Every structure is written in structure tokens, then in C-alpha cells.
Image (cartoon, helix red, strand yellow):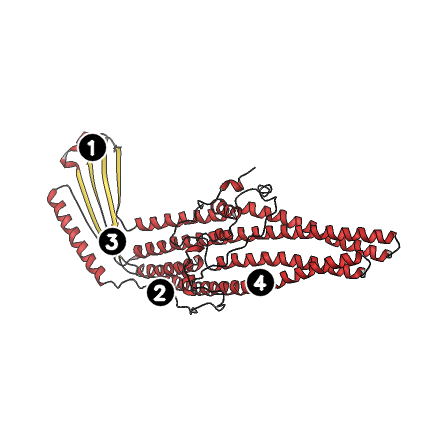
């Protein structure tokens, strides 16, 4: 149904204005009768009141998790994470996706407002033997979809929720990137520590080999002992190339994570350093608070909101659509005549449309969006359960590796003492050479295990910070370079 009025006279223009007011009033009345858009809360997932590893959980807040890497007190690690936040390709891709989502939200918001355009044309018409006639027009056009049943409003709400989900996805990428940088850095330091242990043990075994060769020349031992000493030294020497390869590859991984070519950080990371250790004074939040901190859970929650709005949008598309449009223009045969009052032309059009038969397409669209909503519910539930599992796993691993490191440190101390005494007594001819080999092998294994366990303990802290949602700002502000970070640490040639 459409009603239009077009004339050049002022009384008709007044009547069209009155008609516009009447149509607008009827439209608002219909809008008042329309049912409000249904809203659905995110599904309820059972959340425990506290973490199962009670001896590690300490009630507190989550403010210290924003830049958790500073808790390791390692300036180079902090500089690497800050550089990754700025230059990592995956993080920057997520930033671009966020900008795109915000632009789409603005497009949806624009649909709620009237559209206004201007036009102008000039033409010359000749028919048969008649003289040519000029025609000049200039006009202003406007249209407005009244959105009585909320098609555009729901589209805007869906776009807004999608933009918020994209912001949370950016936070999730920042969390993952910071954790990956820290884990690779810890792996690098752990491999460097293991390389130093292998070098020290190799020097000790080569010294034992030299003693064995002297005793062989003196006829005190057989060639069997000498060959066993050489085999032990060669086995330890074979560990060194594998550790050096791991170190180089980890340097390459860190460089790529910070947006640099693979070999860019070789000189910066050439010197060995200690495995960074986090302070044990972390204040953990309760499970429900952790879920609010996790960016992936927030993103899943916003996706549920967007899906609910899309269901309402699809349902509203089956209802009548009301719109107003009009134009105000000038029409004359000469340009000069455009300024005359007789050249004024106005048009007002009010229309309503409603689908009568579409083969069930609109109903199918509603079912499609409802199915998408069901999927978003399940995705949210999965995100919550995964978040709870990640924290519990990290806490259990942290507790276990603490105990393991303590036992290994005690074993390494005992193995070192045993190896020293065995070498001394072997040099004096008081013990068999097999005891020396066994004690040296045990010393190497326990010291290597201590270095690995120390790195594992630091990695457990990183995984715990990641599981708790550390590394991003839930208020929407991107993680920025801390004032305590010196960027020159990773920019040296």
C-alpha cells in the first residue's frame, strides 16, 4: 500500500505534511502493539565455588594478571612480549578484524536513520519538427524505514555483539601470543642450561678418560675400561649438537613471534641466561571471576548475544515493513527559471509492504538462525568447561612439578657428591671403574632433569597465567608497552 502527493501549490504541500503526521502516528501505534524483541541469557553452566588444589589457591583479585610476565623479573622477556603485542602478525590480524567488525556495526547503526541525497540534471528534448525543449531539475530526496518491528535494531544489536566478540578475540590472541613468547623463552633458557650441564659433564668425563688412558699405559687397567670411558664421553658429546639445534630453532621462533625475520634475535639471545622463575605470591581469583577474565569465554558470550539478536531480526523480517520517502525539487526549462516559485515540486510517499508467499524462505531463515543460536549456546558451554579444565590442569601440574623439582635437586646434590668421591677413589685405585661410569651417568641425568624440571615449573606458571586469562585488558584497552620495558633490549643489531 502506498500513498503519494505531488503538486506545485502550497495548500497541497500543507496537506501532505498533515498526511505525514497521521501516518507517523499510526506507525507509532503499531509499534506500541508490537511485542518486544525476546532476549535470552547465556546458558547456565555449573561452576565450582573454589579450585580443587586448595593449597595453591589464594583468594584475591586479577589486576596483577594484565602484565603477568613482569612477575618473572626478566627485562628481556618483558621486552619480547611487548614487541610481540605490537608486531605479531596474528595479533595485528585480530586488530584488523576488530576494526572491520566495528565498521560493520556502524553500517548497521546507519540503517536506523533517514537517508538524504541530492540530485541535479539537465536535458534537451526534440520531437519531430517541434522545437527542442530544455529541462533543468535540482532536488533533495529523503527516505526513512521506520523499523516498527525492530529488523534494523536487531541487526545493530547483533553487529554490536559481534564487535564485542571480536574485541574479546583480540584479547584471546594477545593472551595466547604472550604465553607462547614466554614458553619459547623458557624453553630457550632451559636448553641453554642443559647445554652448560652437558659441557661441564663432558669436561669431567674427558678428564676421567685421560686418567684411564694414563692408567692403561701404566698397565693398571685394561683397554676395556679405556673404551668404556671413551664411549661415555662420546655419548655426552652427542647431546650437544641436539641442544644447540633446539636453541637456534627457539631463537627463530621467538623472532617470528615478535614480527622479525628468523635470525634477527640471534645476537640478542646469544648469551645464556637463567631460567626465569615467577614469584609464588600470585593471588588467584575464584572460578566465577576467572571466567569473566577469560577472553575466549567473553567472546563466546557475546556470540550468544549476537545469535539471539539475529533470531529476532529474522523473525521481524516476516512482519510488515513501513517506510516514508519524499523529495523536494525544482524543475524548469531554463536555469534562471529554477529560482521562481512555480518551479517548486514536492513529493511525499508513505508505503507498507509485507511478504505474502515466499515458499517458506523466511520461516526457514528463522530456523537457520535458531540453529545457529543453539550452536552458540554449546560453544559457550564448551568454552566455560575448557577454561575450568585449563586452570585445574595448570594448578595440578604446578603442584606436581614443585615436588618433583625439590626431589630432583636433592638427587642431583647426592649424585654430584657420589661422582666426585668415585673419581677421587678411582684415581687412587680404591674403586672399580664401573662405579665411576655409573656415578657420572647418574650425575648427568639428575642435573639435566633438574634443568628440565626448573623450566617445566616456570612453564606451569605461564600456563596458569594464560588459563586465568592474563595478558589482556578486559575493559577493551589493548595491552601496551610498560614503562619499565626497554625496547632497545631486542633492537640491538
* Residue 73 placement, left or right of 243: left
Q: Is residue 480 above or below residue 437?
A: above
Tell me the number on the disc at residue 146.
Answer: 3
**How far apart are labels 1 and 2 at the CA level?**
63 Å
Please report contact status of discs 3 and 2: CB closer than 8 Å, yes or no. no
Residue, disc 1: 333
**How far apart are labels 4 and 1 at the CA level?**
91 Å
Tell me the number on the disc at residue 41.
Answer: 2
Secondary element type, mark 4: helix
Label 4 or label 1, whichever comes before in sequence order: 1
Q: Give the mark toward the camera: 3 or 4.
A: 4
Label 4 or label 2, whichever comes before in sequence order: 2
* Residue 237 placement, left or right of 317: right
Q: Give the mark toward the camera: 4 or 1.
A: 4
**How far apart are labels 3 and 1 at the CA level?**
36 Å
Q: In the rendered image, which quarter is residue 304 located in?
A: bottom left
The residue positioned 64% from the left and 62% from the top of the image is: 410
Q: In the rendered image, which quarter is residue 26 located in?
A: bottom left
Please report contact status of discs 1 and 2: CB closer than 8 Å, yes or no. no
Tell me the number on the disc at residue 410.
Answer: none
Amino acid at each position: 500500500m502506498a500513498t503519494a502527493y505531488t503538486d506545485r501549490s502550497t495548500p497541497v504541500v500543507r496537506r501532505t505534511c498533515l498526511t505525514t503526521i497521521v501516518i507517523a502516528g499510526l506507525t507509532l501505534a503499531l509499534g506500541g502493539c508490537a511485542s518486544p524483541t525476546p532476549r535470552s541469557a547465556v546458558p547456565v553452566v555449573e561452576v565450582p565455588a573454589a579450585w580443587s588444589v586448595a593449597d595453591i589457591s589464594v583468594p584475591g583479585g586479577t589486576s596483577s594478571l594484565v602484565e603477568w610476565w613482569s612477575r618473572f623479573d626478566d627485562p628481556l622477556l618483558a621486552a619480547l612480549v611487548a614487541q610481540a603485542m605490537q608486531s605479531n602478525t596474528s595479533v595485528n590480524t585480530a586488530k584488523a578484524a576488530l576494526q572491520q567488525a566495528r565498521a560493520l556495526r556502524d553500517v548497521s547503526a546507519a540503517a536506523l536513520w533517514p537517508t538524504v541525497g541530492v540530485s541535479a540534471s539537465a536535458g534537451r528534448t526534440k520531437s519531430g519538427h517541434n522545437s527542442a525543449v530544455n529541462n533543468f531539475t535540482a532536488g533533495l530526496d529523503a527516505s526513512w524505514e521506520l523499523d516498527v518491528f525492530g529488523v534494523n535494531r536487531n541487526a545493530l544489536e547483533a553487529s554490536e555483539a559481534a564487535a564485542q566478540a571480536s574485541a574479546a578475540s583480540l584479547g584471546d590472541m594477545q593472551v595466547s601470543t604472550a604465553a607462547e613468547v614466554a614458553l619459547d623463552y623458557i624453553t630457550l633458557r632451559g636448553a641453554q642450561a642443559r647445554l652448560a650441564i652437558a659441557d661441564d659433564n663432558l669436561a669431567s668425563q674427558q678428564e676421567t678418560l685421560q686418567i684411564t688412558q694414563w692408567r692403561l699405559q701404566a698397565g693398571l687397567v685394561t683397554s676395556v675400561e679405556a673404551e668404556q670411558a671413551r664411549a661415555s664421553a662420546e655419548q655426552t658429546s652427542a647431546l650437544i649438537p641436539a641442544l644447540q639445534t633446539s636453541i637456534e630453532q627457539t631463537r627463530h621462533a621467538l623472532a617470528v613471534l615478535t614480527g622479525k625475520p628468523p635470525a634477527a634475535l640471534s645476537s640478542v639471545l646469544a648469551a645464556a641466561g637463567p631460567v626465569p622463575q615467577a614469584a609464588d605470591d600470585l593471588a588467584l581469583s575464584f572460578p566465577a571471576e576467572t571466567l569473566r577474565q577469560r577472553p575466549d569465554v567473553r567472546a563466546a558470550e557475546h556470540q550468544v548475544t549476537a545469535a539471539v539478536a539475529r533470531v529476532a531480526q529474522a523473525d521481524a523480517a516476516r512482519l510488515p515493513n513501513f517506510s516514508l520517502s519524499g523529495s523536494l525539487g525544482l524543475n524548469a526549462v531554463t536555469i534562471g527559471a529554477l529560482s521562481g516559485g512555480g518551479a517548486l515540486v514536492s513529493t511525499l510517499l508513505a508505503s507498507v509492504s509485507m511478504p505474502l508467499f515466499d515458499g517458506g524462505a523466511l520461516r526457514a531463515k528463522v530456523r537457520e538462525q535458531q540453529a545457529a543460536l543453539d550452536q552458540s549456546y554449546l560453544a559457550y558451554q564448551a568454552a566455560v568447561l575448557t577454561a575450568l579444565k585449563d586452570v585445574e590442569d595448570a594448578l595440578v601440574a604446578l603442584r606436581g612439578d614443585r615436588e618433583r623439582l625439590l626431589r630432583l635437586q636433592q638427587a642431583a646434590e647426592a649424585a654430584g657428591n657420589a661422582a666426585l668421591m668415585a673419581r677421587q677413589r678411582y684415581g687412587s685405585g680404591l674403586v672399580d671403574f664401573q662405579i665411576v661410569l655409573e656415578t657420572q651417568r647418574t650425575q648427568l641425568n639428575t642435573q639435566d632433569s633438574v634443568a628440565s624440571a626448573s623450566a617445566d615449573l616456570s612453564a606451569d606458571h605461564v600456563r596458569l597465567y594464560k588459563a586465568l586469562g592474563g595478558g589482556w585488558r578486559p575493559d577493551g584497552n589493548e595491552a601496551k608497552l610498560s614503562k619499565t620495558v626497554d625496547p632497545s633490549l631486542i633492537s640491538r643489531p
